[in-house]
Amino acid sequence: MSEFWDWAVAAYDRPGVAEACLDLQDRYDQNVPLLLWAIWRGGDLPAAVALARQWEAEVTGPLRGVRRRLKGRPGAEALREQVKAVELEAERTLMRQLEILAAPVVDDAALRAVADAYGAPPPAAALERLRALITAA
């Protein structure tokens, strides 16, 4: 297991975090692993954004599209679950790659920077809500 993956799984399980992440993904075209990476530690932002964009375009985005198209189709639930598992493994692979780009210490400005650079810039309140949900004691 990677340090980032373990941290991200624990963070994602906190109340409200999954919903906040998916809202940023669906409303502002944000990349959830990249946002979590920025809160976790940040690092080489241009390289991380470029990596996440390419991975989303070539791997996780197409998988997510297939999974969503299978939703509600009769007889396709088992296949949908398999695609969902592959999509999660693809995100985990991206997170391993992002971990390599991490800074040795937390970069508090990284979340805003990656959100602005990746998708439609979300409101500051949405990003601060995500940060607060993850870092709440």
Image: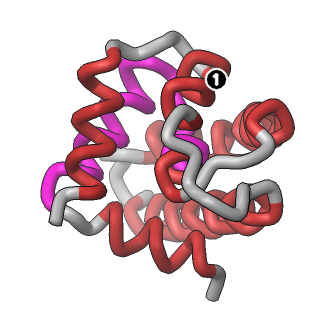
The single residue placed furthest to the front in the displayed view is 105
The kind of residue tagged 1 is: Tyr
Which range of residues does the magenta coloring cover? 15-35
- On screen, residue 4 above or below 41: below
At mark 1, the secondary structure is helix
Q: Is residue 119 left or right of residue 132?
A: right
The secondary structure making up most of the magenta span is helix
Q: Is residue 36 left or right of residue 42?
A: left
Determine the image quadrant of residue 96.
bottom right
Q: Residue at x 16, y 66 (%)?
A: 137
- On screen, residue 2 above or below 84: below
Q: Quadrant of the N terminus?
A: bottom right
Q: Residue 92 in the image: state x and y as whole percent.
A: 63, 67
Q: Residue at x 63, y 48 (%)?
A: 42
- On screen, residue 6 above or below 109: below
* 21 magenta-colored: yes
Q: Residue 72 in the image: state x and y as whole percent.
A: 31, 45
Q: Residue at x 28, y 57 (%)?
A: 135
Colouring convention used in this rendered image of the protein: secondary structure
* 54 magenta-colored: no
Q: Residues within 10 Å of mark 1 (few under 14, many from 20)?
A: many
Q: Is residue 81 left or right of residue 97?
A: left
Residue topped by disc 1:
118
